[in-house]
Image (cartoon, rainbow, N blue to C red):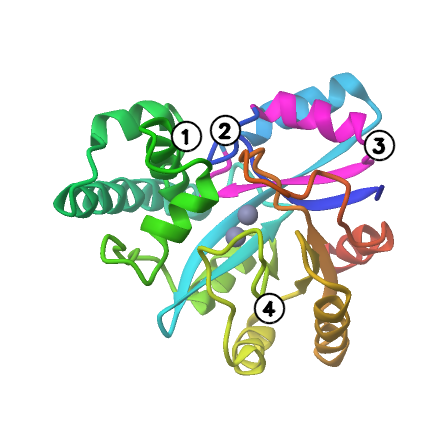
Amino acid sequence: MFDLDLHLHSTASDGTLSPSELVNKCAENGLKVVALTDHDTLDGIDEAIGRANTLRNIEVIPGIEVSCSWNGTEVHILGLFARLDDTRLSEYCRRARKNRLSRSKKIVERLQHIGVEIKFEKVIELAGDAVIGRPHIAKALVDAGYVKYPKEAFDLYLGSSHSSYYPSSTISPVEAIDLLVESNALPVLAHPFRSKVKSGRNPIVNLSTLISELRPRGLQGMEVYYGDYTDSQINRLSLIAKDNDLIECGGSDFHNSGNPGEPQPGTVGPPIKTFHSLQERLK
Ligand SMILES: [Zn+2]
Ligand SMILES: [Zn+2]
């Protein structure tokens, strides 16, 4: 098991463990430092840090995962050491929540159009207070018996190649880096390659072009250790990170999703020295 996991989700977005339950699980798995990186929200951070302060054997880095699109490809940028009191970041989260709600409604309408009988009200109910997203629609499809687990919903209904797909109106990666740099968070490029466990997302083509756009604007790290990446994927990403002076980050991207083979917190990770390198860049 590893000491550091820099990519985790809670019920504040599309994870199924509350921030406290997630921190408990991470501590049980022996993790020393973890980052909570919910999609487009900082809502779970206070609770996660509160739980870590009670446990005292684990530290929580406040983080966020910003959804972007780049030439038609979904790109995610993590912001580590995000500040909860930053007004620009809060305003971004507010807008993203609104956009996600209207996108989810469009997707459910498209599903209904092809005869899938799920109701938008049900998806809203499943999301609760969380920032809504396709995983909540996936859960509704599981509950209605259309698929066995969430990944199958992405494979059969929600992936970008399906007729019910509706693109998100997200910001560009450059805008995300600018937002994170201005709010004093450290931007990290998430999961550049395809992961077998997450089939709903395409790999970034022209990764070197994207890095050459983002590095001068303040990109600080890239996920090298991630989810179910193979040794050869890790080795390739490690070389790219070194070539571009990017800190080698990563984590499980744990959602407690119920997908078979989902990597658990602490089973994938960068070495603890990554944490110290990140702290250096914060100065
Ligand atoms: Zn992601
Ligand atoms: Zn994630």
**Looking at the image, which residue sits at the far top?**
54
Q: CA distance from mark 2 to mark 4?
A: 30 Å
Identify the magenta region: 18-42
Q: CA distance from mark 1 to mark 4?
A: 29 Å
Callout 2 touching callout 4 (CB < 8 Å): no
Name which residue type carries label 1. Ala
**Looking at the image, which residue sits at the far left?**
113
Instruction: Give above or below for 223 relative to 64.
Output: below
The residue carrying pointer 2 sits among few (fewer than 14), some (14 to 19) or many (20 or more) residues within 10 Å by Cα, namely many
Q: Is mark 2 within 8 Å of ligand 2?
A: no
Q: Is residue 89 left or right of residue 96?
A: right
1 vs 3, front mark:
3
Q: Is residue 75 magenta?
A: no
Q: CA distance from mark 1 to mark 3?
A: 27 Å
Residue denoted by label 2: 11
Write down the quadrant of residue 248 in the picture.
bottom right
4 vs 3, front mark:
3
**Which quadrant: the N terminus?**
top right
Element carrying mark 1: loop
**Which quadrant: the C terminus?**
bottom right
Residue 130 — which label?
A: 1
The residue carrying pointer 4 sits among few (fewer than 14), some (14 to 19) or many (20 or more) residues within 10 Å by Cα, namely some
Residue denoted by label 3: 30
Residue 23, percent from left and from top? 69, 27
Q: Is residue 9 left or right of residue 102?
A: right
Residue 265, percent from left and from top? 71, 38
Q: CA distance from mark 4 to mark 3?
A: 32 Å
Residue denoted by label 4: 218
